[in-house]
Amino acid sequence: DLQVSFCFIFVIKSELFFYYLFSVARVTCVFSQSCVLPCSDSSSSDVINWSRLTPADGTVHCYYGNQDQLGQQDQNFRGRTSLFTDQISRGNASLLLTGVKVQDEGTYRCNTSGNKLCFIAAPVSDIRIHQDGNRITCSSEGIYPQPELTWSTEPPSNTALQNRTTVHQTEEKLYNISSSLTGPDGPDLTYSCSIRTRSSRRRATLHKLSKNQNQVVLKRKTGESEDETRKQKNLYSAQLYFLHTDHIFSQKNH
């Protein structure tokens, strides 16, 4: 009987978990931008209450008596929430949240249509990649959630890429990431640095020429002798490179 009872409780909890997992609407809001948390009210009620359940319980926005009632509003949302009051009579109880912060991430509840799981995204917007001697550094700032950085070469290098990656979180809870590696000597290689989060990805590539090829490029460009070329190398980068970036960002509101 004990085993049967345990099994019965486990099945109920599992069903509730899957019901919660698939019934919660998921919304992605972009850091520092405005975001709409959708909510519909088929009863056209004039009482609308938005609250946040996690990570901390609190009132986000309350409306009744044909006006906002913000006396109990969580101070973290002061001046940043509003409803589409001209559409409430048509069943639109959606919440407009402005100046989105990382701290806004969590589970919200609209009293008329259930929970909303709100994700915050600060996409990878820019990658800086540069070379200093035989060391190549790739970095980006102001990202959320915590990004991942990977290196690759084309053609693939036979030597393991020795890199060191550091991640720092700012006061705004955004992430800065930087990684440096020592490029192996040998034939021409194209180095790719990819930085990604769950909703965005950006890649920068750097093509490094060998020292001999650099000398040929400089000689052809200046029309000077080899000795003169060596003198002029102080005026040029020891390693010439071409830089390319590409960016993918996806935002889904369910």
Image: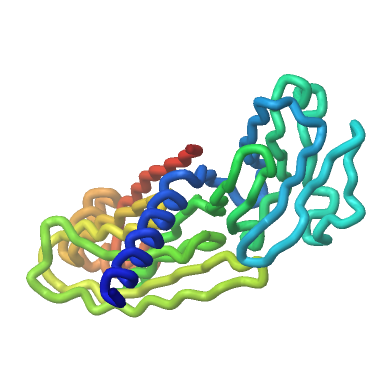
* 68, 81: nearer the viewer: 68
Q: Is residue 239 visible?
A: yes
Q: Is residue 161 above or below residue 33?
A: below
Horizontal relation, residue 100 to residue 232: left or right: right
* 195, 30: nearer the viewer: 30
Q: Position of residue 44 (x, y in %)?
A: 74, 25
Q: Position of residue 148 (x, y in %)?
A: 37, 65
Q: Is residue 225 above or below residue 111?
A: below
Q: Residue 8, located in which quarter of the rendered image?
A: bottom left
| Residue plotted at (31% across, 67% down) | 238
Q: Residue 41, located in which quarter of the rendered image?
A: top right
| Residue plotted at (87% across, 57% down) | 72
Horizontal relation, residue 195 to residue 61: left or right: left
Q: Position of residue 25 (x, y in %)?
A: 51, 43
The total number of labels drawn is 0
Horizontal relation, residue 196 to residue 107: left or right: left
